[in-house]
Amino acid sequence: MLEHLLPQLFNGLILGAFYAVVALGLSLIMNLTGTINMAHGSFLTLAGYLAFALVTRGTSFWFALLVAPLLTVAVGIIVERTLMRPLYGREPFYSLLLTFGLSLVAEEVYRLIWGANGVPFSPPPSLAGTAQLGFMTFPSYRLFIALALIVVIVALTLFLTHTRFGLRLRAAVLDSEMIAALGTNTQILYMINFGIGILLAGIAGVLAAGLLGLSPTSGNALLMPAFVCVIIGGMGSLFGSIAGGVLVGVAISLTTLYIPAASEVAMYILMAIVLLVRPRGLFGEEGIFG
Amino acid sequence: MKLNRSTFVKAAAAGAAGFGVPAFVPRLGEAADAIKIGVLEPATGVYAAPGGNEVNGMEMVVEAWNAKGGVLGRKIELVKEDEQSDPGVGVQKARKLVNQDKCVALIGTVSSAVSLSVSGAANALGVLFMDTGGHTDDVTGKDCHWNTFRVCHSTWMESHAIGATLLKRFGKKWYLITPDYAYGHALENGLKDVAAKAGGEIVGNELTPLGTTDFSSYLTKIESKKPDAVLVLVQGDDAVNCLKQMNQFGLLKKFPAGGPQVELEPLWQLPPEAREGYWGIEWYYKSDLTLGKSNKAAHDFVAASAKKYGRPPTARNCFGYVGLDRVLTAMADAKSTDTAKVARAIEGVKFTSIFDGSAYFRKEDHQLMWPMWVAKIRPNGTPSDKYDLFDVLDTHDADSIEQSVADKAKVCKLNYPA
Amino acid sequence: MSLQRLGLVASLAVAVLLLFAPQIGPLIHLDTSIVSEVLLFAIAAMSVNLLLGYTGLPAFGNAAFFGLGSYGAGLSIHYFNAGFFLAIVIGIAAALLGALLIGPFLLRRRGIYFGLLTIAFGQVFYFIAYRMTNITGGEDGMNFPRPLVHLGGTTIKIDDVIFYYLSYVVFFIALIAFWYLVRSPFGHTLIAIKQNEVRVRYLGLNSDRFIFVALIVAALYAGLAGALYGLLIMFTFPLALDWHQSGDFVLMLILGGQGSVWGPLVGALIYVVGKDIISTITPAWQIFLGGLFIACVLGFPKGLLGTTISALLARERESDDSAEAAAALEISVPR
């Protein structure tokens, strides 16, 4: 079994990076406004479909990877301004119900536009091969995903820690009343925060479309694991979401190796253990980043 | 965008009334004297695509029969409900169709769980149920009923068809990727049965949870076992993911891959590089082996369906078509819509249809006995037809791949009412 | 008419209307079975209400108990030929067993963590039901017949209409029991825990014990609903345990109005009947149902019933009866 361990670990890290980015987006949105975004998966799917639409109109995969997430953010901002804003300050259940309703609508809309059957979407030929990594051959596309996600995570961290906007964002999570009193327009802050969360979902969505299928229901499968990652990592901690993602990815991969039957439920058992032992998650604090 | 509370409440009330009104009005266009057939297919969720194709097949039957005056002088009407791949919803909608809409027969379903629950509900309601797309052995096995018939092949038939071809063409050492639920295990058992009888060996078996999006953990293990063939037993979306990833890992170039059953719907979703392997198929629109060389009915159906829906018909269209066609034929033969009479008029009757050769619904378990085929996938179709993905190679006739009547009799008792 | 009397009249009107559901339903294409389903889901939503609406604990995994009830009834009939009522009892027992099993773990956490733990445990049950194909039928689920009932010398076949009236009786017993429960000292303690658990503890009460009992009662309600639902559709399947099912119950509660006794019924009515009617009209029903949820959240912040009652209460603000009315209608203090 040992010769399988390293490749499996590697797999797990890549899977984990993927979960991490999705979890990050969820976490960002949750931390600042208490909004539980049950429609996060729908945004992932939207980005995939928009990328598909661009590519079928002749653009390159790279162009789609750049533009589709931005278009998705535009949709996200419209949603935020019209539907989410009335819910700020209310209990999280309402955002849960509303975003759930939104996910239902989105799924049907995708079905009406692009059909119930999925659509083919694949990475560009330059990424279609395999790379020899010494201990295993690995699909180039997965390596690309890993690199892309690492770049995204690093960029986000730099943004949050080294820009003034990032500073305000982190301050707002701690005390949004104070920051409003100090003159920051919190409405714009919330809007941009949501936009960043959706941007992360969008990028993950385009990458996922090349890896998995693209159909009206494909984004939903990633939602629950992402939530679990947020919880395990600790709500309120962005670094926790990353850590949670990696942990879940590795846990699933390793369970698959040793106890394949349990790999699906491993995630929930892990979540239960974390909740019982250290409920605020591995890195959770009262809303402090990192 | 602040909503004024009281105007909103009024609007919501009006909206609610608006929803209620259509419920009061009987469904538009309902001819009072029509024979109503209740259609239970998923219109939402992961099975919406095959469900929709089954309905398309049925609609062509209705057109054809109504053009000839219907059955017993009455027009045929389909009353459709979305069973949402939920067994509970399936049962409730079945009751609505029979009790409220006065349907005399039920047809449809894709998910096996819904087939089972609807079969039971139909039995309690005393109406005919033609299972078009639910594959579990139990529908014509331990959960069989006198009023339930099944068009698509059983799980046992699927595993035995591909098993026979693999033995013939590739060898006896197989590596399985099995979805870890009842359907996957049923396929696994069927393949073990084939292997045991032929001296084959299953060198590896990966159990993957349903809804697995990432197969990488399983795929990395395959190479070292050097199997003669890799069998992918996963279905639908899982199959799409698995094949896509197998391709990305370069496995499709190294080992022949195949599976007991594949459908055009998921294949059309895959990029061409991931369309590989030898697969059991239940019907195909463009092969002499599946349609029969001079089978006019078959070729007419394919042409008409492609014209009407913009895409070639899949096996799902065929299930819907054959299922409804036989129900209506039986009603005409029995000169009645009474369930028991119609059931007696269906079973055992040999007929020809839109596939090669003749078939019949077996008297003992109501399974349609028709062949399965095995095809190799053409990744890009042909230059003239990008949909033409199957190069059909082998035919396996029903008796060689389904359990014998004696075996089935051990688990299935139809129990006709006295 | 005072608010209290209005509430009583409304309650009676609903009871009478429901009494004639098998006769009225078909007029709007509603099968009797669907109305039975509304009542049963309302009971399940009551179990969520007890924990969420009155004790302040997000019960996101109650389908675990619902599903255990369904499997308990189904398995006992399938394997042991249990009678109709025995099957229900076994179903409830299964749900209670589940609560006893996971209760001690759930007690260790509050708030959102409690909710997430319930989901986690629910998924473990789902996984078990799913995997034990030989016993439970796995993902294909399991058919089972509705046992005949032998009373005295006669044998009664429980058809859809009889089943409905049975559900009707069970529902109203459950409702009245719920009403008494939340007015009792026990119920008031739960409400106090929702408002401030620390204060309750300082008053010398063991809040853990109260929460545990609330969990047991919730499991009882959900298990009863599940057992009856299994008997309604004569089928049991793993999805009944899944977090999506739990989510449906929570949705019904939020739609109707948590913290009120009739809220679960209102929510179940909107959700089940709404979904049934809309899905019959169009295959694109998800758009309308989703839109309905969004509209409800934006227009009715306290759920349909909760908001209506709050609005009516606001109008009675000047009246002396308002405080009494609030108590009589069992509206917990809005946040």
Image: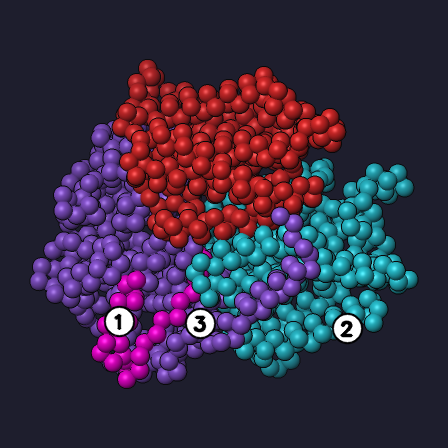
Q: Is residue C30 magenta?
A: no
Q: Amino acid at mark 1?
A: Glu
Reply above or below: B369 against A48: below
The structure residue drawn at horizontal position 31% and vertical position 46%, both measured from the top left corner, is B266
Q: Which chain is purple?
A: B
List x then y, in percent, for residue C154: 60, 82
The structure residue drawn at horizontal position 69% and vertical position 72%, both measured from the top left corner, is C14
> Distance from label 2 to label 3 (Cα)?
35 Å
List x then y, in percent, for residue C47: 68, 55
> Distance from label 2 to label 1 (Cα)?
53 Å
Q: Which chain is cyan?
A: C
List the residue tagged with mark 1.
Answer: B63
Q: Is residue B29 visible?
A: yes
List the residue tagged with mark 2.
Answer: C9
* SS label for mark 1: helix
Q: Is residue B370 visible?
A: no
Q: Which residues are magenta?
A: B56-85
Q: Which chain is red?
A: A
